[in-house]
Amino acid sequence: MNFSSRITGVGSFVPKNIFTNHDLEKMMDTSDEWIQQRTGIVERRWVDQGTSTSDLAVEASIEAIKNAGIDKSEIDMIVFATLSPDHDFPGSGCFLQAKLGIPEIPAIDIRQQCTGFIYAMSIADKFIKSGSHKNILVVGAEVHSKGLDRTPEGRNVGVLFGDGAGAVVMSQCSVSDSSKDSHFINAHLHCDGSYAKELWLPAPGTGFDEPDRMNQKMLDEKLHYPYMNGKTVFVHAVKRMSESLSRLCAEQGVTIDDIDLFLFHQANLRINSKIAEMMNIPEEKVFNTIQKYGNTTAATIPLGMNDAIKEGKLKPGMLVASAAFGSGFTWASALYRF
Ligand code: UT7
């Protein structure tokens, strides 16, 4: 028997605290004008101190499971993408599993940063296609705010990132008419580790010539905050996202006109506009959320998916394309009929 997977439920959650660019002007040497012109971001959500990544994921997951119309006991695996886990180990999927109260099912953490959600969907799709699993909870969640340098020195990265969570349930299905029936079509996953240090969080880590994973020297050098070579990342993001999506479309015999909605990663409005221009995608088909959430890395695509549903822009039967790029460098594209 041939199995396929499809998205049966979507959920998302963002913390209530809104930080506008003007709020950030009070913390860092930055301006609303600079942030909006360079990135498109107007505001982002940041958690209060009692909230963890898996806490945000719980809320998104409950909504996704409810919208899938199943009981949580029918979930048979969790795939959790995050770069800001509750703790170094165990993975945040373990914490989420306990909080949801669905013991014994496997939980896999994915560490592919901004590309994490597409990797996670692709892995869930493969498990479902193998016939071993039926309803997989796929989550992307981040609490960036607790890991950002929010002092004047941190403005390069600190203004870009926001907190949030998104989740989908991917369930087994059969497809009789692939031009109409909802299903996950395919994803292309990529990585080039030679660029790992262009966007990374060095410490804590074993990759130092030091006896400990973390020490005062690393703290003094601020190695526990993310570093990004923004210009290099920008150029590679535009090239790799468009290249990956073009190849996937060619493989599937899909044209840009066939695609109803583009749900891209949200790192910079200018990246997505450039990709739209290069690929001749009408701007109105690209659904952007960066203005209100900033870059929420692995949470971005499912968060956008749920907003698009709520705004009536994503409807059953639509052909959707996603692409993402991030630390690793990793990048990916996916095509799915919603
Ligand atoms: O999701 C993961 C993938 N991430 C991305 O795809 C991000 C890709 N990169 C970008 O989006 C852009 O490179 C940034 C938005 C990060 C930066 O934009 P940019 O146009 O590349 O600016 P820049 O880094 O070249 O900085 C230009 C100037 C610098 O000042 P000088 O050297 O020209 O005097 C920076 O110091 O802007 C300064 N600057 C700021 N000014 C005000 C940097 N950050 C800020 C800030 N506020 N927050």
Image (cartoon, helix red, strand yellow):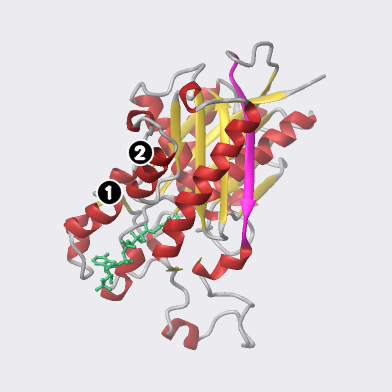
- Work out whether residue 200 can be spotted: no
Can you give x and y, in whole percent of width and height, for residue 235 in the image?
A: 44, 57
Can you give x and y, in whole percent of width and height, for residue 233 in the image?
A: 45, 60
At numbered mark 2, what does the secondary structure look like: helix, strand or loop?
loop
Of the pair 325 and 174, the residue shown nearer to us: 325
Residue designated by label 1: 40
Question: Badge 2, how many Cα within 10 Å: few under 14, some, many 20+?
Answer: many
Q: Does the residue labelled 2 lie within 8 Å of ligand 1?
A: no
User: Is 304 placed left or right of 99 in the picture?
Assistant: left
Can you give x and y, in whole percent of width and height, for residue 228 in the image?
A: 43, 67
The image quarter containing residue 119 is top right
| Circle number at residue 240 | none
Q: Which amino acid, by three-letter code, is at mark 1?
A: Gly
Tags 1 and 2 touching, CB below 8 Å? yes
Distance from the alpha carbon under mark 1 to that under mark 2: 10 Å
Residue at the location (47% across, 53% down)? 237
Residue designated by label 2: 288
Would residue 159 be counted in the magenta stretch?
A: no
N-terminal of the pair, mark 1 or mark 2, is 1
- Work out whether residue 172 can be spotted: yes
Split into quadrants, the picture shows ligand 1 in the one at: bottom left
Location of residue 239 with respect to 287 vertically, above or below:
below
User: Is 291 placed left or right of 117 in the picture?
Assistant: left
Can you give x and y, in whole percent of width and height, for residue 60 in the image?
A: 47, 38
Residue at the location (49% across, 56% down)? 236
Question: For the magenta stretch, what is the residue range?
Answer: 181-192
Would residue 185 be counted in the magenta stretch?
A: yes
Location of residue 244 with respect to 235 vertically, above or below:
above
Q: Which amino acid, by three-letter code, is at mark 2?
A: Asn
